Amino acid sequence: MAGIKWVLASDIDGTLVGHGGEALLADYLRQHPEIGVIYLTGRTRANAEPIIRHYGFPDPLALATDIGADVYWGPDLHVDENWAFQQRRDWSPRRVVRALEGLDGVMFGARSSHWRIVFQIRDLEALALAKAQLIRAGVACRTLWDGDERRLDIVPRGALKGRALKYILNRLNLKAQQCFVAGDAENDGDLLEGRYRGVLVANGTLSLRDHLPPVIWRSPYEGAYGVLDGLRQFIDDSLPLVPAEYAG
Ligand SMILES: [Mg+2]
């Protein structure tokens, strides 16, 4: 932690990896140890760690998995039990499954982790039915719809990347102004809502692009190139012209 001046808080898939430039960004980050990295991903820890290592990205200050349902602290990645306990309080996978059991057009897919239940949904009508049924049954949860795959993911109510990031920064005693966020998709929406400066990479979801606050740079570059593009601007702009000890 010592010597960390800035933080890059980034999504992994589609943002850090998948569109080229990964090695370039990894090099940049290795050359700038004053930039700590927080990874916020929909992946589980077991799926996230090998990717981070494969591309040579720095060890995490923290890693938030399952869209923020779990928080792990670097470098050894021990789980934050306190955070997990908060999530667990009103999370009941059994109630989710029971509420949606036997609904027409709603097929149980898998428990992809402790925090995520996946359903295959036939059409938008079945989607509306499923959502209404969850509300009727009073199940505390958050739903994430992927229209291309007709897939409905159900996660704990508090599983939000932005919420996890706020918690992590607080615990690390870092200010919002020190943090730069990066993302590409719907589940990064609450990272990119204006609390932090940041970047939406060029391959980012259209629906996000139309609603970005001015502090979020729309990079013309995809993936890691876009992150690097935005991050460099952030670091350069943030360097004080007059050292703090002389500033009024
Ligand atoms: Mg993504």
Image (cartoon, rainbow, N blue to C red):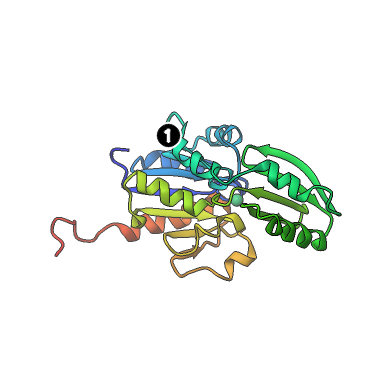
| Residue beneath the point at 60% across and 37% down | 44
| Residue beneath the point at 63% across and 61% down | 205
> Could you tell me which quadrant the C terminus lies in?
bottom left
Which is more toward the observer, 97 or 39? 97
| Residue beneath the point at 54% across and 54% down | 183
Residue at the front extreme of this rendering: 137
* Residue 185 seen in render: no
Q: Which percent across, then down, holds residue 208?
A: 59, 65
Asked if residue 126 lies left or right of residue 138, the reply is right
Q: Which percent across, then down, holds residue 105?
A: 85, 54
Badge 1: few (under 14), some or many (20 or more) residues near its Cα, within 10 Å?
some
Asked if residue 164 lies left or right of residue 45, the reply is left
Q: Which percent across, then down, holds residue 58?
A: 45, 37
* Residue 37 seen in render: yes
> Could you tell me which quadrant the N terminus lies in?
top left
Residue at the top extreme of this rendering: 76
| Residue type marked 1 | Gly
SS for callout 1: loop
Answer above or below: position of 227 versus 2: below
Q: Which percent across, then down, holds residue 116?
A: 65, 43
Residue at the right extreme of this rendering: 104
The residue where tag 1 is placed is: 74
**Tag count:** 1
Answer above or below: position of 7 versus 128: above
Q: Residue 34 appears in which quarter of the rendering?
A: top left
Answer above or below: position of 137 versus 214: above
Which is more toward the observer, 16 or 100? 100
